[in-house]
């Protein structure tokens, strides 16, 4: 059976493994309030019923990392789902037309040579686990969803990571960004 | 309204804008016979009813082309749907795990420095129009679908293009390939 890499992030007011603490619009239009987040593997047409909003994205191969960076990422790889990682963030972003009109080498230059996106992420591994979902090509309101998980001890590091990325040249191409913070809702039930 | 870039290529025995001449397995498992091909924009869950097979893929940004190559592609750009282009080919391919384990710079090196994929395609523009669809991440049996359209006068050039690509180092990473040839079925009805 062929398996799609598409996942759904459904904001709703009933239930979910994660409780939403805040939904903050950083750039552009906001996203409505919701109490819980449900994450599940899904077809592009499926929408969790009773959801306030539903964001879909698919995991894929790395688009910019070169051999040396990829090897460092593999060594420092942090698994999601660690029981100590009771905090999470979901950060949907959309890049503007100017970004998407750039060629691969131009995007790579801004992404890494100038903005040090991978290098910055590596600094916080394995404390802050992250997973990237792509959504630009499947009719979604954002281009990427990034999911982060970390233990309460790393709150300051997480703020620093997000702050650092938002100062980069890459971020000038972002025309919509939402910052959703969450805590594991069933942690004591495991 | 948000628009998905996902398209469906449905092989069936009833109708379609393109009549299938041959379906030839080049590498790996074959694809069942069908008489017509219907191409339509579609959600990932939609499947054309009565189809013998249904392949989905989405258009996206260029993954390897650098600035100079992208500019050449734009200058020589060939539109699909020219009335003189009465022949077409649909070539679904899948790349093996070794390919997908490579980093961006390693893939780029094989794709262009060694195999000259873009440079070869450019040689046949604007005579042979092409469009690439991605399908690896959405639960499909292939990684890419490439669609070609050309006038009967360019049959030999098309064979040369396909032959050239199949000799490249890049093609050593392909573990399934089907070559579907078609002709416009409603050409005289326009």
Image: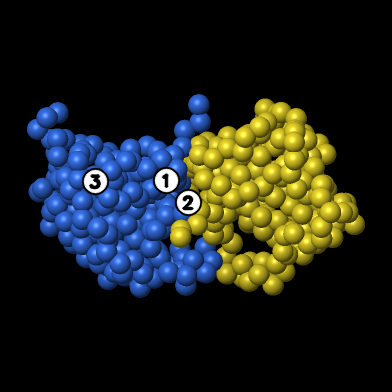
Chain colours: A blue, B yellow
Question: Does the CB distance between marks 2 and 1 fall below 8 Å?
Answer: yes
The residue depicted at 22 percent of the width and 65 percent of the height is A163
- Determine whether A174 is above or below B7 in the image: below
**Residue A189, image quadrant:** top left
Q: Which residue is mark 2?
A: A138
Nearer to us in this view, A83 or B51: B51
The chain carrying label 1 is: A
Residue at the right extreme, as displayed: B153
**Which is more N-terminal, label 3 or label 1?**
3
Binning the other alpha carbons within 10 Å of mark 1 as few (below 14), some (14 to 19) or many (20 upward) gives: many
**Which is more N-terminal, label 3 or label 2?**
3
Q: Which residue is mark 1?
A: A58
The chain carrying label 3 is: A
**Residue A29, image quadrant:** bottom left
* Label 1 vs label 3, nearer the camera: 3
Spot occupied by residue A37 in the image (x, y as percentages of width and height): 24, 44
Q: Which residue is mark 3?
A: A12
**Which is more N-terminal, label 1 or label 2?**
1
Q: CA distance from mark 2 to mark 3?
A: 22 Å
Q: CA distance from mark 1 to mark 3?
A: 21 Å
Spot occupied by residue B45 in the image (x, y as percentages of width and height): 50, 39
């Amino acid at each position: 059976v062929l398996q799609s890499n598409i996942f759904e992030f459904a904001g709703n007011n009933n239930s979910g493994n994660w409780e939403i603490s805040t939904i903050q619009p950083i750039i552009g239009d906001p996203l409505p309030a919701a109490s819980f987040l449900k994450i599940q593997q899904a077809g592009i047409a499926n929408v969790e019923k009773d959801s306030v909003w539903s964001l879909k994205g698919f995991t894929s191969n790395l688009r910019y990392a070169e051999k040396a960076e990829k090897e460092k990422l593999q060594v420092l790889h942090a698994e999601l789902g660690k029981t100590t990682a009771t905090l999470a963030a979901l950060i949907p972003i959309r890049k503007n037309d100017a970004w998407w009109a750039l060629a691969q080498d131009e995007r790579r230059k801004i992404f890494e040579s100038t903005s040090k996106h991978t290098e910055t992420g590596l600094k916080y591994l394995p404390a802050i686990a992250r997973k990237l979902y792509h959504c630009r090509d499947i009719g979604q309101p954002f281009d990427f969803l990034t999911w982060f998980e970390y233990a309460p001890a790393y709150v300051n590091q997480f703020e620093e990571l997000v702050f650092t990325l938002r100062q980069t040249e890459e971020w000038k191409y972002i025309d919509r960004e939402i910052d959703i913070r969450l805590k594991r809702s069933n942690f004591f039930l495991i």
